[in-house]
Image (spheres, grey):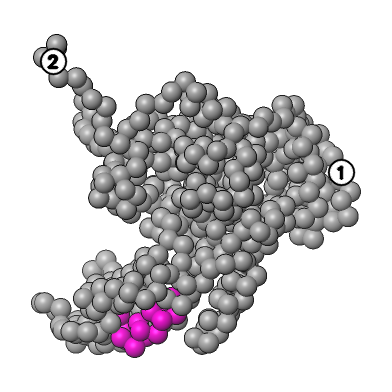
């Protein structure tokens, strides 16, 4: 008997059998073809990137889950935990090429440390992501396309009753503006929606935490070393400035008086008014509990906002996203609304969604959303609107999904609505072309004919197809 201790597989990693690899590979190939039909170009990013890339993207959320180390060149690096940040890095690196929006797709392993104490119960530390990113457009139609593409892939793989559960972080941020809360207080409330959606004791626990942090005015006291007490207003901060440096609008050093007031207010104010925080808390808590079919959920959310004295029209951005998904052919029973959806709130700025199967155990199969401010955080000169989604391929396959084959595409075209009234007709024409095996790239941006041809040329299209409201089309070759 050997006295040598065997080297065991690391905890929470798995070995894939030939059968599993064949099924996963066939599924990934099918999804790649499906996304290619919508004009998503394949990209492969390095398995190792600088840790800073992922820390900036997640706001530190992924820090404890990174496999990081210092490589021989002295760089602090990590195994990639997701694809969005590397794909955006690539887009920033090649921004000089123009041609927005750009559509990318990817597939490959990602790594996240997990232990039995984690919320996910210490699931596998390596899994496969397949996904897509659209960079450079803020059109709601792009949001609808991303949701439609994600559901189309699940249906094509045979996932039973796939559904996209849709929320909207941007609405929450907008609704909090009139309350005059500090940035810290707003961030606390938005980050708490995942707990608040459960109501009862979970809501009580959030309120207790707000008390502990001094956000509700409980235990108000002056900040050490400061003349500005907690709960002060901008006017109070300005008064302290005037008492210190005099009532002047001249610059003090490199910053203006207004800038000094704003910076000091951000540091010192917990919230401008404890009562305002309490009212904001109640509004967000009620909205976090809104979930269900789109029509009923949107109606309920509008009523809650109105009763709180807000503008019920604030819910319109989410309504536009739902309408865009429906215009892409998504069945209404494949959509649900959940304003308590808390998915990567650290960087999402607009709609967010989670993917599920109604007939399985309810685990997430993936998801995504809009993150319009992320490119600047990663070093871009300007903000670029962006959105995307990713599947956890192993979770998808666990539902019993099986690759079902796909068309072999032969041509690439750019489909353009002739005006806003023709968007629905253009979507239908693009869908028809894809069934025939063509790569049909929808372009919702307002461009001159010259700009349109340049965009189509960069996309590798042989022609552009302009579609009118009545469904008639005009084809123009790309020279």
Q: How many badges with numbers are in the image? A: 2
Is residue 282 rendered to the left or right of residue 143?
Answer: left
Give the quadrant of residue 404.
top right
Give the label, 1 or 2, closer to the camera. Answer: 2
Q: SS at mark 1? A: strand
Q: Is residue 48 above or below residue 422?
A: above
Residue 287 in percent (x, y) is at 48, 74
In terms of sequence position, does the residue under pointer 1 or pointer 2 come before the other? 2
Residue at 28%, 69% (x, y): give it. 255
In front of the other: 395 or 280: 395
Q: SS at mark 2? A: loop
- Which stretch is magenta? 270-284
In front of the other: 72 or 120: 120
Quadrant location of the N terminus in the rendered image: top left
Give the quadrant of residue 185.
bottom left
In front of the other: 165 or 409: 165
Question: Disc number at residue 60?
Answer: none
In front of the other: 347 or 452: 347
Residue 126 in percent (x, y) is at 36, 35
Residue 67 in percent (x, y) is at 27, 37
Residue designated by label 1? 474
- Let me know if residue 278 is in the magenta part: yes
Residue designated by label 2? 4
């Amino acid at each position: 008997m050997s006295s040598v201790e065997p080297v065991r597989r690391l905890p929470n990693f798995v070995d894939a059998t030939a059968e599993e690899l064949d099924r996963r590979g066939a599924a990934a190939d099918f999804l790649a073809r499906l996304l290619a039909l919508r004009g998503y170009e394949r990209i492969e990013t390095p398995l190792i990137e600088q840790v800073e890339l992922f820390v900036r993207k997640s706001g530190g959320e992924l820090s404890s889950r990174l496999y990081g180390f210092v490589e021989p060149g002295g760089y602090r690096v990590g195994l990639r935990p997701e694809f969005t940040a590397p794909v955006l890095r690539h887009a920033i690196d090649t921004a000089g090429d123009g041609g927005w929006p750009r559509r990318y797709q990817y597939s490959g392993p990602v790594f996240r440390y997990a232990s039995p104490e984690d919320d996910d119960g210490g699931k596998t530390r390596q899994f496969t992501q397949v996904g897509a990113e659209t960079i450079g457009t803020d059109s709601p139609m792009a949001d609808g396309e991303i949701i439609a593409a994600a559901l189309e892939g699940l249906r094509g793989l045979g996932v039973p009753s796939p559904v996209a559960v849709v929320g909207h972080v941007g609405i929450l941020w907008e609704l909090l503006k009139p309350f005059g809360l500090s940035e810290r207080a707003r961030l606390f409330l938005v980050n708490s929606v995942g707990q608040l959606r459960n109501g009862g004791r979970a809501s009580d626990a959030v309120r207790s935490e707000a008390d502990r942090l001094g956000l509700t005015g409980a235990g108000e006291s002056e900040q050490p070393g400061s003349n500005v007490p907690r709960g002060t207003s901008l006017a109070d901060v300005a008064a302290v400035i005037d008492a210190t440096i005099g009532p002047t609008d001249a610059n003090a050093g490199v910053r203006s008086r207004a800038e000094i007031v704003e910076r000091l207010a951000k540091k010192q104010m917990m919230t401008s008014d404890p009562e305002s925080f309490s009212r904001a808390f109640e509004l967000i808590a009620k909205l976090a509990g809104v979930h269900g079919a789109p029509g009923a959920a949107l109606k309920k959310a509008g009523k809650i906002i109105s009763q709180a004295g807000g503008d019920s029209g604030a819910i319109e951005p989410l309504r536009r996203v739902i309408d865009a998904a429906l215009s892409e052919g998504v069945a209404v029973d494949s959509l649900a609304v959940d304003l308590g959806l808390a998915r990567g709130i650290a960087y999402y700025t607009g709609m967010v969604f989670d993917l599920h199967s109604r007939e399985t155990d309810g685990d997430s199969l993936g998801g995504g959303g809009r993150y319009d401010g992320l490119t600047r955080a990663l070093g871009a000169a300007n903000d670029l609107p962006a959105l995307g989604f990713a599947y956890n391929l192993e979770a998808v396959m666990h539902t019993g999904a099986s690759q079902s084959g796909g068309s072999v595409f032969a041509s690439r075209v750019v489909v353009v609505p002739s005006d806003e009234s023709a968007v629905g007709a253009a979507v239908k024409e693009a869908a028809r072309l894809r069934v025939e095996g063509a790569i049909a790239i929808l372009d919702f941006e307002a461009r001159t004919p010259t700009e349109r041809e340049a965009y189509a040329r960069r996309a590798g299209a042989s022609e552009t197809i302009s579609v009118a409201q009545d469904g008639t089309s005009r084809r123009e070759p790309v020279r």
